[in-house]
């Protein structure tokens, strides 16, 4: 039995071989949908880092490249052998492990067996608790080449796709059928098999330009060069730069400006291996159709970029397509694209002309046949609720502005009518936009048409917000109705599912209110939205009124938390401190964020952390102790520090009223910081839990006044001391 006087057992790492090599791993497949490529590359990069770290394999960098037909992983300087480690595990004490005759007991034998060592191989070590048994196992590790056949399939399994499929007898799931695998470590093929396909050292170029012949490679450098000769730019960022340069040249030559669209650019990057920009044209007569229709038709149906005339700023009769082919085919590709687009634009013009033959107001009658949700009736029901809620909001947010209320009322009455138009049926992305267009055509006021157009803004989390007051009200009413309606029937987002985009609606509500600086009690409008749902007679959850409002409030406040973290970079504890006591008070989101920002500023003062330590001491005492609370009795004070604290609290309570009223939260918090000396002196001078019950109760009541003064602004018990 070995002995050593090691007081503190530690995990020790032995030095392994230092040689490294490049790992090249490529999955070749049928074309992926462009939306899947970037997600797959990010997942592959992340999982590779985690898998190799867990396997005790250090590496230099992890990079991924990809096209619709291939996902490529390159790991530089991957260690050629696992790092050796020494693992030490403490077992039973020596007294338990051996009997009086010095023979091992069942405890020692069981520990040794569990650790996979012999009893003789255990070590007895001196520790601060006495002598204990230790199992010491030295793991020299394996060669990386031996581990990779097991590790590489794990990387593939960790790639997430929104949709996957099985296509052969192996039952392997992937977004598209896998056609080849490249796995090279240090230039040598890794003997791995994935989806029934054995890895090799051969890849394939562009489906058309490459000629179908395999390319034999040794590493990423030869792979990159070989693919480029066969019509593949494997680096997405190089393809992006290439596309931008080509588009810029075409725009300069044609005297037009690009309608920049990052989503469309991403689509072009991930649908091509050898991108080539082509300028095409369409008949100028189609420019009579609203530009939104033309741009959407080009983008959604064909993936084409639209352009504008540099002088007039109006849409030009040209488009830019990104082909995945070589230049000698361009005339044919241009002609084909122009022909297909002409058919699309002809359809769009037809729908537009037909739609204008029937007024929006007349179309709105058909909403009784359009289902909003099978538990929540028709779009006619929803439109009527939105109209009532928008009117309620307008009259309370802008009292006395009858014209604004009339605009909201009229816009809401027509807000969903474009859902039954031909154009919106063809291009759902244009709902609201076409409603505004047709409202103008029908002779509605510009304010009504603009409000209808803005009702779905923002369309994305960081998208454009409605600019007009009527547009803001209509958007808020529509989203509040959706959230209240689905919560009413028990359709609430979970961690992984949100089929009706209620989180996006809540985020939009938060952004509109905060960025438009709308001072409003949101709880009042949540309650009104819930009542309108109930009045429609739909069967709901058995919530009380307060419970229903509280659930929706919590849902929206969760988006306020996200907004505070992302936009204002606020600490989580500060956000929670302000939001914690928000229930049963007016729900003014602008006010809440102002409080958060003021609190964030004051926490950076050096005296703040010591103040919080004193406050938390007071807070814990009044929460933990049991006493009969009565008004503080100055006659029972036994030390000047009690009088001083009582006076300071009374003065602060008197001062803060006007500052709170005008929202001068910096001044309020500075005053609270000023209480630090009085709180510190109190705790230094007196013992709260004295044996005299009357004195004890009086001191606890005094601390309760301190606690309530702080808590009336925010829950300071949530604040984490930063240790400055």
Image (cartoon, rainbow, N blue to C red):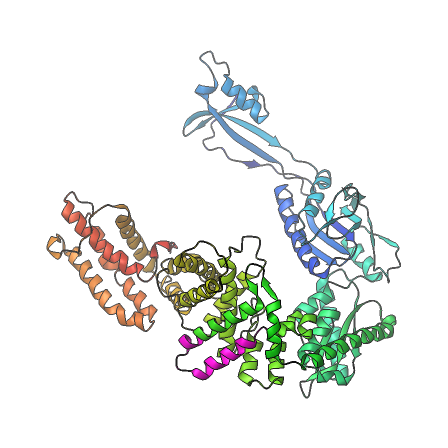
Number of disc labels: 0
Front residue of 521 and 617:
521
Task: Residue at 43%, 55% (x, y): give it.
Answer: 543
Q: Position of residue 506 (x, y in %)?
A: 50, 64
Q: Position of residue 286 (x, y in %)?
A: 75, 82
Q: Position of residue 610 (x, y in %)?
A: 31, 56
Front residue of 7 and 230:
230
Q: Please state if 46 lies on the left or on the right of 493 as rendered.
A: right
91 up-or-down from 167: above or below: above
Task: Residue at 32%, 73% (x, y): give it.
Answer: 662
Magenta residues, dominant SS class:
helix
Q: Looking at the rendering, which quadrant does residue 337 occupy? A: bottom right
361 up-or-down from 174: above or below: below
Task: Residue at 76%, 55% (x, y): give it.
Answer: 70
50 up-or-down from 16: above or below: below
| Span highlighted in magenta in the image | 394-416
Can residue 301 be seen here? yes
Q: Position of residue 104 (x, y in %)?
A: 51, 16
411 up-or-down from 492: above or below: below
Q: Please state if 195 lies on the left or on the right of 477 as rendered.
A: right
Q: Please state if 94 lies on the left or on the right of 694 as rendered.
A: right
Can residue 468 be seen here? no
The stretch drawn in magenta includes residue 167: no
């Amino acid at each position: 039995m070995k002995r050593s006087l090691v007081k503190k057992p530690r995990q020790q790492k032995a030095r392994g071989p230092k040689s490294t090599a490049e790992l090249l791993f490529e999955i070749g497949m049928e074309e992926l949908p462009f939306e899947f490529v970037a997600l797959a590359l990010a997942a592959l990069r992340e999982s590779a880092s985690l898998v190799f770290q867990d396997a005790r394999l250090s590496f230099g960098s992890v990079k991924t490249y990809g096209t619709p037909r291939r996902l490529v992983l390159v790991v530089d300087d991957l260690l050629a052998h696992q790092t050796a480690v020494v693992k030490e595990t403490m077992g039973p004490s020596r007294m338990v492990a051996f009997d009086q005759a010095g023979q091992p007991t069942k405890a020692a034998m069981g520990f040794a067996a569990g650790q996979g060592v012999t009893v003789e191989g255990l070590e007895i070590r001196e520790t601060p608790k006495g002598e204990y048994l230790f199992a010491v196992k030295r793991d020299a590790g394996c060669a990386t080449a031996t581990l990779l056949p097991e590790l590489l399939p794990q990387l593939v399994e960790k790639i997430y796709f929104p949709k996957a499929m099985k296509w052969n007898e192996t039952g392997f799931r992937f977004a598209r059928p896998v056609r080849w695998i490249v796995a090279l470590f240090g230039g040598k093929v890794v003997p791995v098999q994935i989806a029934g396909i054995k890895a090799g050292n051969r890849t394939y170029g562009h489906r058309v330009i490459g000629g179908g012949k395999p390319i034999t490679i040794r590493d990423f450098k030869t792979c990159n060069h070989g693919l480029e000769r066969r019509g593949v730019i494997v680096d997405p960022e190089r393809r992006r730069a290439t596309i931008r340069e080509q588009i810029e040249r075409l725009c300069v030559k044609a005297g037009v400006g690009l309608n920049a669209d990052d989503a469309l650019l991403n689509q072009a990057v991930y649908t091509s291996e050898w991108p080539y920009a082509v300028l095409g044209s369409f008949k100028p007569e189609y420019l009579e159709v609203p530009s939104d229709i033309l741009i959407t038709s080009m983008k959604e149906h064909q993936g084409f970029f639209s352009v504008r005339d540099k002088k007039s700023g109006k849409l030009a009769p040209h488009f830019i397509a990104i082909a995945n082919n070589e230049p000698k085919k361009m005339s044919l590709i241009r002609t084909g694209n122009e022909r297909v687009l002409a058919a699309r634009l002809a359809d769009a013009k037809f729908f537009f002309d037909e739609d204008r033959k029937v007024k929006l107001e007349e179309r709105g009658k058909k909403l009784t046949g359009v289902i909003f949700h099978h538990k929540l009736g028709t779009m006619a029901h929803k439109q009527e609720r939105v109209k009532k809620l928008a009117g309620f909001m307008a009259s309370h947010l802008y009292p006395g502005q009858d014209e604004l209320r009339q605009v909201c009322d009229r816009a809401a009455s027509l807000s969903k009518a474009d859902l039954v138009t031909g154009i919106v049926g063809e291009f759902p992305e244009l709902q609201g936009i076409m409603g505004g267009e047709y409202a103008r055509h029908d002779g509605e006021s510009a304010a009504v048409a603009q409000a209808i157009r803005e009702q779905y803004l923002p369309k994305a989390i960081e998208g454009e917000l409605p600019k007009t007051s009527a547009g803001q009200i209509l958007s808020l009413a529509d989203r509040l109705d959706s959230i209240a309606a689905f919560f009413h029937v028990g359709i609430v987002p979970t961690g992984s599912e949100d089929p009706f985009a209620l989180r996006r609606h809540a985020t939009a509500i938060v952004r509109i209110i905060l960025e438009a600086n709308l001072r409003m009690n949101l709880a009042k409008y949540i309650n009104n939205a819930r009542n309108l749902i109930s009045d429609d007679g739909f069967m709901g959850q058995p919530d009380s009124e307060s419970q229903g409002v509280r659930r929706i409030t919590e849902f929206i406040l969760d988006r306020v938390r996200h907004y505070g973290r992302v936009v204002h970079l606020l600490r989580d504890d500060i956000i929670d401190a302000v939001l914690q006591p928000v229930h049963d008070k007016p729900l003014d989101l602008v006010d809440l964020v102002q409080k958060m920002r003021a609190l964030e500023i004051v926490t950076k003062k050096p005296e703040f952390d010591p103040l919080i330590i004193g406050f938390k001491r007071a807070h814990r005492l009044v929460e933990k102790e049991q006493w009969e609370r009565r008004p503080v009795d100055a006659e029972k004070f036994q030390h000047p520090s009690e009088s001083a604290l009582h006076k300071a609290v009374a003065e602060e309570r008197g001062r803060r009223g006007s500052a709170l009223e005008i929202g001068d939260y910096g001044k309020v918090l500075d005053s609270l910081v000023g209480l630090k000396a009085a709180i510190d002196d109190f705790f230094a001078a007196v013992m709260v839990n004295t044996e005299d019950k009357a004195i004890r109760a009086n001191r606890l009541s005094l601390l309760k006044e301190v606690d309530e003064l702080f808590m009336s602004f925010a829950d300071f018990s949530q604040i984490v001391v930063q240790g400055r």
